[in-house]
Amino acid sequence: MSSISADHSAAAPAAAKVIQPAWVRIVHWINAVAMVLMIMSGWQIYNASPLFNFTFSRSITLGGWLGGALQWHFAAMWLLMVNGLLYLTLGLVTGRFRRKLLPITVDGVVGDTKAALTGKLSHADLTTYNYVQKLLYAGIIVVGILIVLSGLAIWKPVQLQWLTAVFGGYDVARYVHFFCMAAIVGFLVIHVALALLVPKSLRAMIIGR
């Protein structure tokens, strides 16, 4: 009887283990909303002066016209910047980035990619990221920084001419901004698909456990 009780009491804390702390969940969902708003309004802005021989359907854009899209884009930009800075600060201060994202090795990424493609990649322990996750999450942080900086270079090319110059000029900054957007959209598609394939990871990002 005492053995059963001991086993039960030991299992209880494990079942209640926090996988995603509250601050991670909050900034995650704020970032998700901000990114969607920025992408949809950004597509409307793109349509006003396309870089390539195509435009986005109005059904997936936000703002209705260039002026409205810019208002949405700037509002979401501040939300993303403030929330992103908070995420970066807490990630560094708490050591989460070091624990979750490092190390990243070529052999590890290749091995986990092969395992994922053959359906052999384990998702049993949600507290530990596999090498593919580490690469994607670290990469999207870099892309997020680049898209903000290139966006500022496009928004204030005169006041921030030094930043615009770092990107090689206004036109190059626009291309950098566009391809960063494409990378984020690709990441979101993969991220959502994996969340649907591993529902417990989505639950952890909602309730923490």
Image (cartoon, grey):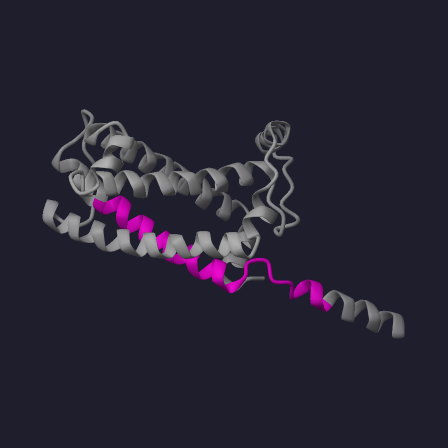
Magenta span contains residue 74: no
Who is closer to the viewer here, 165 or 62?
165
Tell me the residue at 40%/43% (across/down): 188
Residue 100 in sight from this viewpoint:
yes
Who is closer to the viewer here, 153 or 57?
153
**x then y, percent, for residue 112:** 61, 33
Task: Please tell me how many numbered marks the rendered image carries.
Answer: 0
**x then y, percent, for residue 148:** 31, 43
**x then y, percent, for residue 142:** 42, 39
Horizontal arrangement in the rendering, residue 7 relative to residue 86 (left or right)? right
Residue furthest to the front in view is 162
Q: From the image, which quarter does the C terminus lie in?
A: bottom right
Residue 58 picture quarter:
top left
Tell me the residue at 12%/37% (across/down): 48
Tell me the residue at 10%/48% (across/down): 67
**x then y, percent, for residue 131:** 59, 37
Tell me the residue at 23%/55% (across/down): 75
Residue 65 in sight from this viewpoint:
no
Give the residues drawn in magenta, as a range. 12-41
